[in-house]
Image (tube, rainbow, N blue to C red):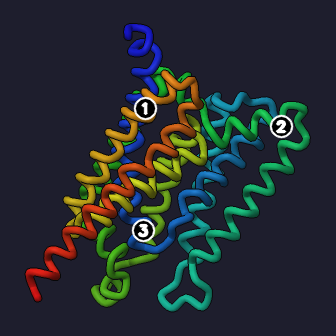
Amino acid sequence: MADFISLMIAPFAACLVLTGMHAYLGLHVIERQVIFVDLALAQIAALGATVAYLFGFGLHSPGSYFTSLIFALTGAVILTFTRSKKERVPHEALIGIVYVVSAAASILVLSRSPEGGEELKSLLVGHLLFVNWGEIIKVGLIYGIIGIVHWVFRRRFLLISQAPLTAYQEGLHVRFWDFIFYCTFALVVTSSVEIAGVLLVFAFLVVPAVSGMLAADSIRGRLAIGWISGVLTSVFGVTLSYYGDLPTGATVVCTYLAPLLACAIIGRAARARVDGSAA
């Protein structure tokens, strides 16, 4: 038991930190119907890391991190200025193009490295099992600052995510606030991918938010359910990976299926009860 605690307490803490911020941002992503924006920005950040690696920086070095951040912020600018009030092409389609081009570019860059296959695997699954407390504290501070920004301007962010036409009618500078949103999002994703990899970051972003939306109607209810499901999944997934000798990130991703199904069943039962009472 002592060995389990000493080895897995840091990965578990990292999962909690990731869940706290990603479950909230996931609600915005789903409301905006840009589900794959996380994958796109995560892949752009990963492309930055591969470019830095090709120039001699380690994958988890400061040079790699800042290169990834520059790439991710560039992606945020692209996503901001490709959204318009009257979209001729769905924004999700453009996000998909950004993702696939970034993924292909990462493969091309890593093909110039003898260890390209291993580095690509590292970008996909991260190094959650070997995360240290310094990384967790750094990410926690970054998320804390971003959380304050989103709390102060929460009405603007929520209005643009839930009712963009109303935001335009009220005279909000939608493109400016989109830029702020995507820049904070890029900073979160860059910090997350370095620890958890592209796949787990996507799971942390989308699955808790979807679970909350399936079981609750209010923003507070969805956030609470998303956070609770994320915490429970982290506990069970990390424990299962330890005792089953399984990759931690992949185990946590697969474990997320259980709370998702539970929330779907609970939400459906609750709606059926309400419909029955109304009838």
Q: Please say if 19 is above or below 80.
A: above
CA distance separating discs 3 and 1: 24 Å
Q: Is residue 128 left or right of residue 107?
A: left
Mark 1: give few (<14), some (14-19) or many (20+) Cα within 10 Å: many
Local secondary structure at mark 2: helix
Task: Bin the neighbour count of mark 2 within 10 Å (Cα to Cα): few under 14, some 14-19, many 20 and up.
Answer: some
Quarter of the rendering containing residue 157: bottom left
Q: Is 67 drawn above or below residue 40 in the view shown?
A: above
Of mark 2 and mark 1, the one earlier in the sequence is 1
Name the amino acid, label 3: Ile
Indicate which disc residue 14 carries: 1
The quarter of the rendered structure image containing the N terminus is top left
Return the mark for residue 152: none
Q: Residues within 10 Å of mark 3 (few under 14, many from 20)?
A: some
Q: Position of residue 69 (x, y in %)?
A: 59, 46
Please tell me whether mark 1 sits on a helix, a strand or a loop. helix
Q: Which mark is residue 30?
A: 3
Amino acid on which disc 1 is placed: Ala
Which residue is under mark 2? 116
Going by the numbered disc 2, the residue's amino acid type is Gly
Residue 208 left/right relative to 250: left
